[in-house]
C-alpha cells in the first residue's frame, strides 16, 4: 500500500492543542467548524484544519457532500507536505497502477477540487495537476519512479508503511 498510514501523517500533532480545539469546537455548529478549518488552513495549520472539517462532518452528516471537497483539499496538502510522493498526492495505492487507473483517480480528485470553495482548493489542484503531469507521461513517470525507488526517504516510508500494515493486519485478525 502506497498511501501513508494515518498514524504516520499525524504522528507529530500537538495533542494538547488538538484537545483544546476540539473542546472549543464541540460547543459550535458545523458551519463554525468549517469556517474555523478555513482559518486554520490560512494559518498553515493543516492538521487542525483537517480535524475541524472532520468535526463539521460529524456535526451535520447531511452536509457530507459539502464538506468532503474541503477535506480532500486539506488532505492533498497534508500528504504533499509529509510525503514527497506524487502517487500519494493522487491517492494512488499501487505503484503498478496503469495509466487508466491513474487517470480515473486524477479526474475524481481534480473534479472535487475544482468545485470546492475552500481556500485550499486552488493550491491543492496545482499539486494534483503537477502529479498528473508527471505520472501521465511514460518517460517522466519512468524517470520519477527510478528517482523515487532509489531515495532513502521512500525506502524509509515503505518500511514504515509495511510495519503499520502488519500491525493493522494483526489487529484485525
Image (cartoon, rainbow, N blue to C red):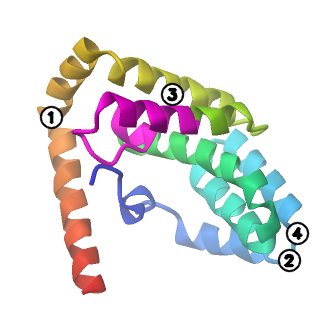
Q: CA distance from mark 2 to mark 1?
A: 47 Å
Residue appearing at x 16%, y 56% in the figure: 159
Q: Quadrant of residue 125?
A: top right
Across and down, in percent, residue 103 comes to 43, 30
Which badge, 3 or 4, is on the more N-terminal residue?
A: 4
Q: CA distance from mark 2 to mark 3?
A: 35 Å
Q: Which residue position holds label 1?
A: 149
Q: Secondary structure at mark 4?
A: loop
Q: Secondary structure at mark 3?
A: helix
Q: Which residue position holds label 4?
A: 29
Q: Quadrant of residue 60?
A: bottom right
- In the image, taking residue 153 as reference, residue 86 lies left or right, namely right
* Residues packed near mark 4 inside 10 Å, few (<14), some (14 to 19) or many (20 plus): few
Q: Do tag 2 and tag 3 residues touch (Cβ < 8 Å)?
A: no
Q: Quadrant of the C terminus?
A: bottom left
Q: CA distance from mark 4 to mark 2?
A: 7 Å
- In the image, taking residue 79 as reference, residue 123 lies left or right, namely right
Q: Which residue position holds label 2?
A: 27
Q: Which residue position holds label 3?
A: 127
Amino acid at each position: 500500500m502506497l498511501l501513508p498510514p494515518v498514524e504516520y501523517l499525524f504522528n507529530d500533532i500537538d495533542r494538547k492543542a488538538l484537545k483544546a480545539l476540539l473542546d472549543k469546537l464541540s460547543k459550535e455548529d458545523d458551519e463554525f467548524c468549517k469556517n474555523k478549518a478555513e482559518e486554520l488552513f490560512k494559518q498553515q495549520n493543516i492538521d487542525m484544519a483537517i480535524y475541524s472539517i472532520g468535526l463539521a462532518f460529524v456535526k451535520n452528516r447531511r452536509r457530507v457532500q459539502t464538506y468532503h471537497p474541503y477535506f480532500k483539499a486539506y488532505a492533498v496538502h497534508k500528504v504533499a507536505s509529509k510525503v514527497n510522493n506524487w502517487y500519494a498526492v493522487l491517492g494512488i495505492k499501487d505503484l503498478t497502477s496503469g495509466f487508466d487507473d491513474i487517470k480515473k483517480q486524477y479526474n475524481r480528485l481534480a473534479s472535487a477540487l475544482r468545485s470546492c470553495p475552500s481556500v485550499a482548493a486552488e493550491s491543492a489542484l496545482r499539486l494534483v495537476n503537477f502529479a498528473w503531469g508527471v505520472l501521465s507521461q511514460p518517460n517522466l513517470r519512468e524517470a520519477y519512479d527510478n528517482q523515487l525507488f532509489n531515495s532513502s526517504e521512500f525506502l524509509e516510508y515503505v518500511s514504515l508503511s509495511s510495519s503499520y500494515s502488519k500491525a493493522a493486519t494483526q489487529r484485525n485478525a
